[in-house]
Amino acid sequence: MITVTFLEASGNRIEAHANAGDTLMQAAVGAGVEGIAAECGGAGACGTCHCVLPQDWFDRMPAPNSDETDMLDFVIDPQPTSRLSCQVSIGENMDGMEVQVPDTQI
Ligand code: FES
């Protein structure tokens, strides 16, 4: 089991437990993280699963594809390390990662 901590805009820290291969979005929704609405169910078409990763974790991951970067252009206040959480597959090496939920998604 892999633990990822989501930092909600309210300041709450929510620990989510996931299996390798789950997406960050699935982990967040399963844990009831506020601000990850995931309205399109993970199709990469809504942007309501926007999250911001720490720079070091962002750098370790494969770069987002062009479909994801195109959608990130439509989220409010995208950051250099923004990702669509539905497009990030959780690996064993992500245990302990912290993910920020933008305050634009309350
Ligand atoms: S759930 Fe819609 S873009 Fe991720």
Image (cartoon, rainbow, N blue to C red):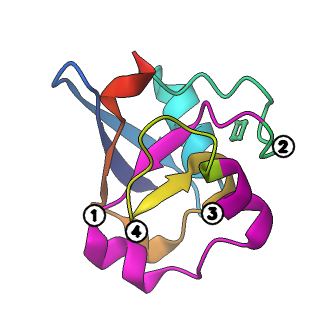
Instruction: Please give the name of the residue rendered at 76% of the width and 70% of the height, measured from the top-left corner.
Output: 66
The stretch of residues the image draws in magenta is: 46-71
| Residue that mark 2 sits on | 43
User: How many angstroms separate mark 3 from mark 4 (CA)?
Assistant: 10 Å
Q: Earlier in the sequence, mark 3 or mark 4?
A: 3
Q: Work out how far the residue at label 1 is from the one at label 3, CA to CA, in angstroms.
A: 16 Å
Q: Are marks 4 and 2 in contact (CB under 8 Å)?
A: no
First in sequence, mark 3 or 2: give its number. 2
Q: Quadrant of residue 45?
A: top right
Q: Mark number for residue 89?
A: 3
Estimate how packed mark 3 is, as few (under 14), some (14 to 19) or many (20 or more) residues with alpha carbons within 10 Å: some
Q: Position of residue 93 (x, y in %)?
A: 41, 77
Q: Is residue 14 magenta?
A: no
Q: Which amino acid type corresponds to the residue marked 2 in the rendered image?
A: Ala
| Left or right placement of residue 87 versus residue 30 in this view | right
Q: Position of residue 41 (x, y in %)?
A: 79, 31
